[in-house]
Image (spheres, grey):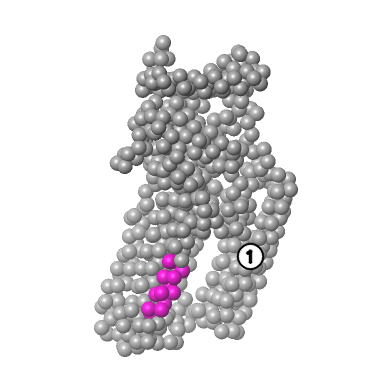
Amino acid sequence: MLLSIEPDGPVPIYQQIRDRIVEAIADGAQPAGSGLPSTRQLAVDLGVNFHTVNKSYDLLRQEGLLRISRKSGAVVQRDPGSGPPDPGWVQDWAGRLRTLLAEAAAQGMPERDIIRYCRVATAGFAFSAREGAA
Amino acid sequence: MTANSLAGVITVAFFGALLCLTPIITRPTVVFGVRIPADRAGAPVIRRERRAYYWRAGAIGVCCTVTAVLVAEYGPWWLARIILLPELAADLGCLQLARKKIAAVKKAEGWFEGLRQTVATDTSWRADPPRFPVRWLLPALMVIAATVIVGAFRYPGLPARLPAAWGSDHHAHKSIVTAFAFVVGQLYVTALWTGMLLVIYRSRPDIESADAAESTRRYRKFLAANTRAMLTLMALVNVTLLLATLPRWQIYRLSGISSVLPLLPFVAGLVILAVVAVRVGQGGSRLPRVSAVQIPAARLSLVSPVREARLARAGAGRGVGPSAGPGRSSPARTDRDDDRFWKAGLFYVNRDDPSVMVGNRFGIGWTFNFGNRTACLIFAGIIAAPAGLAAIMLAAGG
């Protein structure tokens, strides 16, 4: 998995690390059961504070995407093949998605373009074979 | 010319040549300690300063070597070695001159403006870490063992006073510490370099964010080649110390110019290291690229090859995609401009970076992160250990 951040960018570093890992899980680059580097290793490799990586991993753990244990380290817990998410989570996500799409509409982007961009964004995701067939 | 004087001349000539040729082995995106975007590598100021540096450093090397030869012939033996200090200072002055001029143009022309400055890592580095070549340690350890065995046989028959140091006229009382002083040196060199290499194996790979996967692959080769060269040099340093201690144990006697012979293995080790450095370049930058696959400057910061292919397919025929969609307007990706953490372009000081060691900016190899407490402690230990050992030797020698 190639992980890239912009340390001097406007988005907090912990958020960037969290986002990149979520994208890697969606892409299939980090399937369920695969391990991630330890927080110390990733902090060294990105040249950021250890607590920053810890915060990212903690966010992912709270979201149910990561399992962290002393024995096996940080392991991906869910991926596109893990089945449908919790209905409560879907509701929350739909709210955030609406805001994101509203930004495009507010800027004057036509609906068809918004849908095109959504298709492109999800084109690389590793949806399960069952869904693909449906 | 005595052996000691000749060693001084060789040292001055070697470091003169090494510093003159250093820009060849540094990364193309780090020029005289200044980080630059890849597309600025051919900027006129860089070409001009590089040319000027070669001339200046070359002239300094030649002048210092000629001076060293003259003083070796007519002056005391230690004077030739002292010339190394002004030589290093003058070369570093040349480096600073070039660094300041390039940094000024970089700032004035805003080379990093509008670029996405990123830091990248390939997690496969941790999932499949490079293995330290333990077998390459064996030659150095075998030389130490051989030295100890020879010393143990010779020790009972040695006189009550021994030469205090190789080639010196001073003498010290015979004791385990004074007789085996060079074995202590062998152990120090072996333990220090092995320890440092182990720290380096756990450190961050020095990779380019624009091409993280490929530069990680090259860094692996660089690390393997450099480690083997350093372990070879370490074994040859131990051979030099063995050959230097044999006259002290009265096994053979070297006189005149022949007493420079023990230095030959060390010089051979340095040549091997220099050849490897020129072949691989800093961080593997001179190794050939296997694939030209670059991470596109798309909106994606984390891209798997599978996703790349899918995105390409999704974009085809629809008028959108990484090339036609948001990616086209995204600025190009480049390594982060981290000059502010490099004091004088040579010393890395970054308190937020947990790395103990990072890749050198000028030259090949690694340097300490002086903003890291562990790194400072290790550095202090490396400096203090020889002083402590010397004090023990002096105390034991009486």
Mark 1: few/some/many CA within 10 Å (<14, 14-19, 20+):
many
Q: In this view, does A24 lie to the left or right of B345?
A: left
Q: Is residue B109 left or right of residue B265?
A: right
Q: Of helix, strand and loop, which one carries label 1?
A: helix
Please give the count of numbered marks on the rendered protein: 1
Note whether residue A74 is visible. yes
Q: Is the magenta stretch mostly helix, strand or loop?
A: helix
Q: Which residue is painted at 66% across and 62% down in the image?
A: B94
Whole-percent x, y for residue B129 in the image: 39, 45
Q: Which residue is painted at 64% across and 34% down in the image?
A: B331
Whole-percent x, y for residue B90 in the image: 65, 67
Whole-percent x, y for residue A7 in the image: 56, 42
Of all residues, the one furthest to the bottom in this rendering is B160
Is B245 drawn above or below residue A48 in the view shown? below
Whole-percent x, y for residue B256 in the image: 48, 82
Q: Is B194 in the magenta?
A: no
- Of residue A106 and residue B373, the one placed in the foreground of this image is A106
Q: Name the amino acid type tagged 1.
A: Asp
Is B364 drawn above or below residue B300 in the view shown? below
- Of residue A127 and residue A97, the one placed in the foreground of this image is A97
Q: Which residue is painted at 45% across and 30% down in the image?
A: A22
Q: Which residue is painted at 29% across and 41% down in the image?
A: A71
Q: Is B392 in the magenta?
A: yes
Classify residue B50 by image quadrant.
bottom right
Chain letter of the residue carrying label 1: B
Give the residue number, with chain letter if any, for mark 1. B91
What is the span of residues highlighted in magenta in the rendered image?
B381-393
